[in-house]
Structures are given as C-alpha cells and as structure tokens.
Amino acid sequence: MSSISMPQPDAAIIAKKDRIVADLARALPADTVISDPEETLAYECDALTAYRCPPLAVVLPRTTEELATAMRICHDHRAPVVPRGAGTSLAGGALPTADSVVIGTMRLNDVLEIDTANRFIRVQTGVTNLSVSAELEPAGFFYAPDPSSQLACTIAGNIGMNSGGAHCLKYGVTTNNLMGVRMVLADGRIVELGGPQPGAPGLDMLGLICGSEGQLAIVTEATLRILPRPEGARPMLIGFASPEIAGECVARIIRSGVLPVAIEYMDEVCLRAVEDFAKAGYPDCPAVLIVEVEGSEDEIADQIARIRAIADQLDPIEFRTSRNADESAAIWKGRKSAFGAMGRLGDYLCLDGTVPVSQLPHTLKRIGELSVEHGLEVANVFHAGDGNMHPLILFDANTPGDLERAEAFGRDILALCVEVGGCLTGEHGVGIEKRDLMTRQYDPQDMAIQMEIKDAFDPGWLLNPAKVFPLEVSQPHRDRAAARA
Amino acid sequence: MSTVLTPASEAELSEILTGRTTALRINGGGTRLRPDGPGDTLTTSAISGVVTYEPGELTLIARAGTPVRQIETMLAAEGQALAFEPMDHRRLTGLSGEPTIGGIVAANVSGPRRIMAGACRDHLLGVRFVDGQGRILRNGGRVMKNVTGMDLGKLLAGSHGTLGILTEVALKVLPMAESSRTLVIRGIDAARAVQDFATALSTPFEVSGAAFHDGTAWLRVEGLTAQVAYRTDRLTALLGRDRIDTIEDADSRALWRDLRDAAHLTGDDPVWRILCKPSEGPAIAERLGGQCALDWGGAAVWYSGPKDASTVRAAGGLATLVRGQGRVFPPEPPVVAELSQRLRRTFDPANILNPGLMGD
C-alpha cells in the first residue's frame, strides 16, 4: 500500500516474546503489561493511520520507577522500545514494529506541584496538554503551547515532538516553556535535568531532549513555565483579494512592533469547506487572516487600530472585529473546525513545512502550480505569523495509487519549503513520515552527528530506532549497536 | 610558548582542527574569563560579518566574530534589537576586548529581560560550527518553527566552545519597545523585594525586568506607549502608590544597562552568579553576605565577596564563577556528568576544545 518501509522485525526477539512478557509481568503491578494480540491491536498506529503494526507487548507504568524497570528489562532482552504519549502524532512517531515493546505514559497522570509564586508547575508527563492549563485556571495562570490536539495529546508527546500551536507566535513552542525533566534512559537509569530555576549551568541537554522524538530517553516528569492569563483577547478576521496580499499583510504586521498572539491563514478551498461544515459566516474570498491580540479593553482597541491601519493600505475585502465573546467564538470556530471540515471532503495528507515569512506568497503560488501538475486538490490553512504551513492534500484512499500520488505531491511541497530557506517540519516532527526526506535538508555529516548523539544516549539503538533518520543512513549505527550486544 | 590562532574563515578553522591533538583555549572577543589550562588560544574574531539581515522577517544571520556593537547598531537603525539583552562582561572583568555574537551564543549570555523574553538560546534559529575533529556542521535554519531532527543549537548555546567552535549563528530579532518605564521601590530588603516581584510577575502586565540591589527594587514594563502607561499604573496601585517612583524611557534604558552588566558590584573580589528558585534568592543572598544583588525576579543572585568556592556552592542554588580563579561550573550529578562527558567526546574525541572547563 504505502511507500514508507520499516525494518525487518528481529525474529529472535519475537521468538522470546513469552519470556519478555513474563519478565515484565513479574516485575510490574498486575494490569501494567498488555500482551494479548486483541488488546495490543489498539496500539498499532498513531494519527498517521495509513501505517499500522501491532507491537510485541504494551507497558503502561504508573510511576517513573515502574517505567525504569520496564526499560531495563527490555534493554536486557535487547527488545526495541517505542515510546507513546496519547498516540496523536501525525508523523508516525509512535508507530510500533512487530518486535517492539510500546511503553506508554498515559497512566503517569498526576500533577505533582503548582507553585505560582515561582511560576512553574511540575507534572507527570501523561497528563494532557489541556488539563495542565485547566489545573492552573483557578490560580489565574496557563501553560502556553497549545497544539490543536491539546484535548488528547500528552506533555510527554509535546516534549518528544517540541509541539507548537496557534499561540506560539508570542509565547514560543514547548522548548521555550520547558524548565526541567525527569527521564529514563534506554538502560533504565533515571536522570534529572534542569528544574524550577531559570536554566542550569553545563551542557543544555534539556534543549536536546525536547524534540528528540523519543530517540534519547522517555520523559516521565516535567517542570513547565506558567504564565498569568491575559486580561482579555480578541480576534479579527481580514479578507483579501489574493494569497499574495494576505502574505504581505502578515509581513507588515510582524514588522510593525505589534505582537499578536496568533496570525492564522486560510485559503479559498479551506474557507468553502469550513463554511459548508461550520457555518461560521466567513466571507467568500481568496484568502483570510485571523489575527488575535491580547490585553485590557483599551490595549486591545489600540492594537486593533494599528493592525487596521496596516490592513487598510492593502485594500482588504473585509475587516471584521469581534465585539463580544460570541463573535470571537464564531471567528475561531471555522479555523478550529478546519481539519474536521476538510475530512468531510475526503482523505487528506496534512503537511507541516515552515518557510521564511517573506517566501509565503511565492510558496503559495508554487503549491498551486504543483496541485495542477499532480492533479490533486490542496487546501492551505496554517500559522502564518511564523511561516509554519499546513497544506492539506486531498485524495481518495479507495482509489488505487491515490495515496502514493498524494505522498509524491507532499514530497514536492516539502522540497520546495527547504529550497526557499525553510524546513520539512515546523511542529509535527519527522517520525517515519518525513524520515526519508531528511537528506533534502541535511548533508550526510549533519545527520551523522545527530546519530552519534543517539549513540551516546542509547548505545544499543533500542529507543524508537526506525524513526527520524532514513533507514539506509542509520543502518551502520544500528548494525554496530547489534554487533556490540 | 603559546600562540594565538586567528583563522579568517570556516575552512581555515576546519584545517586547524582536523587531526589536531593539542589543546586550544577558545576565544570570541576576549571579554570574559579565560579558562585555565595549557595550550594555544584560538579566536574567532576574524570570522566576521553579517551574512543576511531581513528586518521584515525578524531574522539575522551573522558570522561568529561579528562584534555585538556592530549588530546592535545595524538593528537599531531598523528599530529592532536582540530581545535577550546580552550582558557586556567588560565592566566586571576589566578586559578590553570586543564582545562577539559567537561568544554571546557560546555562553548563552542573557540579560534582565530573560524573565519575559527568554534566554539567548530561545532566540537561536540555527548554527554552523566546526567540531573538535574539524568537521563543518550545520543545524537548524532561519525559520521560527523547526523541529526537523535534533536541536543542536540549544546544545551549542552555553557549551562554551567545548563541543565545537561556532562560525555562524541565525537569530530571531524583535522590534524595539516603543516605550520603557521603570518602577522604583526604595528602602526594602531582599525578601520583601522578591515578594513584590512575585506579585508583579503574577499579573498579565508582562514585567520585563525585576532586579534588586542595596535596598532598592526595580520593575520594568516595556511595550506600546498606551500599554506601558496603563500597566505601570495598575502595578503601582497593586504594590502601594505611596512608595513608588518612576523612571522613564532614556533613563530607564540606562539603568537597565547598568543592571544588565552588574555595574553595581565594585572591588576586586571574585564574582559569582547563582541560579535558584526565585523565592530562595533572598535566603542565599543573606547566607553569603558581602555585596549581593538579585535579578530575574530573585532567580539570579549576584555575589561578590571573599567567601571560598565551597562556601558559595553550599549556600544553595547553582553557582557559576564569573570573575576569579578556580573551577567555573558547579559539579553535575553522576549520570548527568557521564552523559555530558560522552557528548563532549562525541564532538571532540581528542579533548582539545577548552579541556577541563566544563568537566573532564
């Protein structure tokens, strides 16, 4: 079916499944280990559902120490470990292999400490992103990164992928809001990095762990920076006659000194789908920006006036400011339902490349041309303020060859992102989805140093070994690790 | 006899390091402490120049040896700045060199605005560097959001030259604040100051500086003009109107330059910076005595005095020696030390880059 390959599972590991499961079950509480094939099926994929493979077993620990025990047993058996948060990865980061043990963090869901005087929260990493902000709400604080899967996704997954969200234009992504971790190495040893103080002397391994896609360790506890909730927030909706003009407006706002918390972009294809689905009352025009600002009533009015002055120079088709909470919700409703609305049109592939903001108009034009060449429709909905694009390629999974055509179109778009000075992935991660495109962005040496870092943390190449690096590129490292065993 | 190597390009630097087995002390502009130890010195000052600056994109790419002063002047002409407000160490160290952007990134140098805007490493978009084997390596890029592969920029920032020598850095820049105002609270002790900081930093008013020295606390608000007026009014009301003075724009900026550079620490005693939980700052300062100051809302304690290293390190927090002789960094827990050491040997197998500075 698909064009992304996974390594041959190790028959010797599969052959000793019973021993591995027995060792895990003996060392861990009764309901922690899952090995019944009917039950492990629930872990066969993440949100990249085109790729599936049930694991050998699943372990769901409740403490760091239990997780460390499971890691040590897998290490002793040389069984690969696939870390898993909530399984919402769009990049296949949590896809198992038949010889692997999935270790999930979802039962590590305690809030350990809330300290508003020192402005941090310490949690076990199985808590969901949204629940962290919910915990903080009574104290008037929030946790800034807000990936669109925030209802389901866990802090462990957010750290693994260095997740972003619509509001990271102002507040930064996970790595800018992560102060410390407790984590377990592949050999089962527990390590702490950082803490409630701002940074730590010594090498910044915390910055290395964040976004390492489960290649180096499994994070079980996190200390997160928390922020006081803004007094108020208000979105405005600006319609333009072309994607190019909308792109220009984004660049001028960024330059002006006003710092909106979010600038979101939606194109015509997306707007129509959203209008059919959510009836958000969006204008019928080629491009729309949703810009949100924060502050007191007067501060919001001041910022809206400044943005209005910038937009007016570009002859907007529509400039709509929310006057109350209902209107704000209506403006966001369409954007938030965009992926669901697109789903009604059929299957889609969601891409995640980032381009320099000045290259947005050119990139949008080229994506339009590529759409014609590949004969597949594409919709654009993305975080425009930081150039993080999410083109959605529409295809029909039931038409033979359509997925492969969509994947080929996607590869062309991502190559374009790199060509104009951007990157393959802004917030979703490489996983397996973009693994084989890494050679477009990195020279062999630039990938080699990353794999050498994995050698240093995980000499046996047991943690998520078939992800991030193209298999032929990582082969010598994996072979050396196997030979050492 | 020791020599100073001054490669003029990344390629020349790579040639020097390829196959080299003798130690080098790595230097940017030579404004901070030089590590003790044997060997020649290598400076990046000749690998200099701005590669690209795109004001509309808020991005800057510069070679490592580019003077910070040159960059700040260029950004100011476009109404922009390095938001992480890098400290100039010369007022503490008395050295006469010129701070370079590579040195700033290599030491992750961040000023008072760190509490709001983040550290240098949070503004770093990409790096080029040469490792201890002479390999020319790249990581990251010039876009704001990038999770493609591992983030080596974070690892290089604050590695003090022990993993590789930076040759080029890409940084996010930000528009300069339209307005800056500082609230001054006089006649209080450190404990009361940190309570006031906690109150102010728990408001949505985006306080961008919270420092204390010798009975006076300062709180800074920056932003759009109307914003600053409103926010400082609200903060003044919250903290007690009768005891607060204000300092405006140019004076406010000059004050924070002094606080940034720890200009208030006089004399020749060793200088330490101790990182801790903000609420622990006053107790650490009290234990140490001597000249103490607080920044980052209490999370950074500056101490200058005669106490020896073991006494300073035992006072709490994580102490780094900024001026004086001796071990610079606090010891790491065993497994962290082992991982750090493995990382250093991965980049620098012959142990030639600032050996001993951050561990064996």
Image (cartoon, coloured by chain):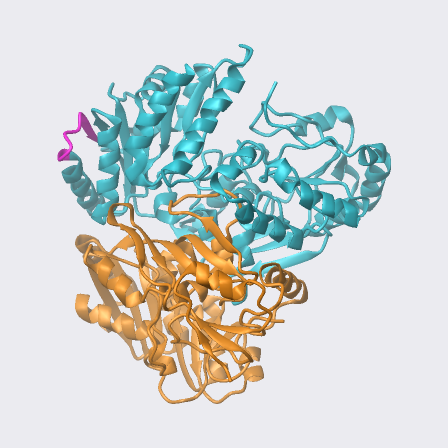
Chain colours: A cyan, B orange
Quarter holding residue A475: top right
Question: Is A66 displayed left or right of B59 in the figure?
Answer: right
Counting every numbered tag in the picture gives 0
Picture quadrant where residue B331 is located: bottom right
Is residue B159 placed above or below A351 in the rendered structure?
A: below
Quarter the N terminus of chain A occupies: top right
Please tell me which residue lies in front, A418 or A463. A418
Residue B34 drawn at (x, y percent):
47, 78
Assess whether residue A314 is covered by the magenta stretch: yes
| Left or right of A117 on screen, residue B233 | left
**Residue B67 shows in the view:** yes
Quadrant of res B108: bottom left
- Along the line of sight, the residue nearer the viewer: B247 or A354: A354
* Looking at the image, residue A293 lies above or below residue B155: above
In this image, B252 relative to A340: left or right?
A: left
Q: Residue at x 38, y 47 (%)?
A: B142
Give x and y (percent) for residue A278: 36, 19
Q: Residue A311, percent across and down? A: 17, 35
Q: Residue at horizontal 50%, vertical 81%?
A: B2
Magenta segment: A312-320
Residue B342 lies left or right of residue B59; in this view the side is right
Q: Is residue A179 visible?
A: no
Q: Is residue A55 above or below residue A74?
A: above
Q: Nearer the viewer, residue A262 or B172?
A: B172
The residue located at (40%, 61%) in the rendering is B9
* Residue A77 percent coordinates (x, y): 81, 44
Asked whether residue B234 is drawn in magenta, I would say: no
